[in-house]
Structure formats: structure tokens, C-alpha cells
Amino acid sequence: AQTVTQSQPEMSVQEAETVTLSCTYDTSENNYYLFWYKQPPSRQMILVIRQEAYKQQNATENRFSVNFQKAAKSFSLKISDSQLGDTAMYFCAFRVDSNYQLIWGAGTKLIIKP
Amino acid sequence: KAGVTQTPRYLIKTRGQQVTLSCSPISGHRSVSWYQQTPGQGLQFLFEYFSETQRNKGNFPGRFSGRQFSNSRSEMNVSTLELGDSALYLCASSLGQGANEKLFFGSGTQLSVL
């Protein structure tokens, strides 16, 4: 079975701090792609960052970076210099080459405090 | 460029009725996928259409159906509504060329079944 586990239901940090959200996944496929999506109160899912499993280098997008450990099937998201606008639900997800559906984790509610 | 548009934003129905939700993808996108989001089950894949053909289907009963038109707009239909169908229904569009693609989401349709 293909699954995604996010072990932190909720996290809160002070503005400007660094926070790391955890994600582990399980798949027997060799080619797959990992994603972090953000869902603010507006409900619209927004892609934060993505990683191809065949790439060893960790993806980065400005203040967002990932720690991808393929052998451990771990894909954590680090947010540096957190901002109030980062407050949202964060979902970890993956897709495999043979199937176009996204498999989602349960999400982590992130609260950035002023 | 206009984003993904879902209509209506909110819908209230009673058990036994049927409902049709609409999704207009970003211009040029040929793939439209649908997801159901509930507090209990999280995000679950319903189906994905590409060039009017259903490419993938999730594990939902036959009461859930969809279609895609030649202009890539998509509709999903739920017949004989049950209380458990209350959820946020999200639509996403992409070019449909590969599993590593970024999905662009609409703001969803919040369906309440009474």
C-alpha cells in the first residue's frame, strides 16, 4: 500500500524562527515525485516545493527546503525565517510515474505567532 | 492567466438528492483531477481526466462520476447523496504530461448534505 504519514498534527513557532515539518512515505515504486502543499484558510492548495526521487540533491525554494532521505523514505520540510503568512495546513504528498493520483498525508497545522 | 475556477463555492443538499460540481481549468491544461477532503478521511483522490478520457479512478462508489468536455472543463456528479458525502471537493488542473507536474488547485466546492 502507498501511504504518507505526517506525525505532527499541529506545530507553532515564533515569527522569524525555523521550523521543520516531518513526513514519511511508503511505496514500492522506484520512480516517484514528492510534494509539499500549503492550504491557507482560503482553502486553495498551493505547491510549496517538489522533489524528484531520482535526484539526490535536496530541493530549495527561497525560505523553503527539504531533507530527502530516500532509503529512510523521509521527506521533511524546513521553513527558515518563518513569516505570519506561512500560517496554514501543510500537506506532504507523492505521485508515481505509473499513476497520476496524489497520495496525501493527514497534514500539519502550522501556526506562526507574532 | 486565470486560475482554476470551481463553481459553486458552497452547496447545501439533502440526502437522496444529486449534485453536479463544475471545474474550469487553466487555459491550455488538458488534465483535470478531483479530490475529496474531509476532516476524518483527509484528502482522497476521486478521478483524473485527460483529453476527455478518464485515466485514473480512486476507490469511490459508482455514485461518484465525472466527465470532461472538449474544452477541458470538467464536471463531477454525485447521485443519491449521503451524509458522509459532506466534504470540500477540490479540482486541480495541469498540462497532463507527467507525474512530476505541478498541480494548480481551485478554491473548492464545500458540499453540505443534510
Image: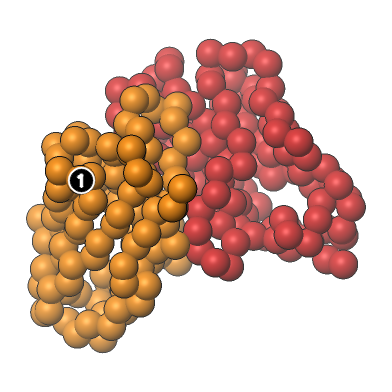
Q: Position of residue B71 (x, y in %)?
A: 20, 45
Q: Is residue B58 above or below residue A55?
A: below
| Residue at x 71% of width, y 29% of height | A60
The foreground one among A113 and B70 is B70
Q: Which residue is mark 1?
A: B71
Q: Residue furthest front?
A: B1
* Protein image colouring: by chain
Using the image as rendered, state which of residue A45 and residue A5 is in the foreground: A45
Residue A82, compared with residue A1, is above or below; it is below
Q: Residue at x 15, y 43 (%)?
A: B70
SS for tag 1?
loop
Residue B57 in sight in this render:
no
The chain painted orange is B
Identify the residue at image location x=22%, y=41%: B49
Image location of residue A113, percent across then percent down: 83, 66
Confirm whether residue A57 shows in the render.
Answer: yes
Q: Amino acid at mark 1?
A: Asn
Q: Judging from the image, what is the letter of the chain drawn in red?
A: A
Query: 10 Å neighbourhood of mark 1: few (<14), some, or many (≥20)?
Result: some
Drawn side of residue A34 relative to residue B5, left or right: right
At 17% from the left edge and 82% from the top edge, which residue is drawn?
B15
Residue A95 % position (x, y):
41, 31
Left or right: B24 in relation to A29: left
Quadrant containing the C terminus of chain B is bottom left
* Foreground residue among A107 and B8: B8
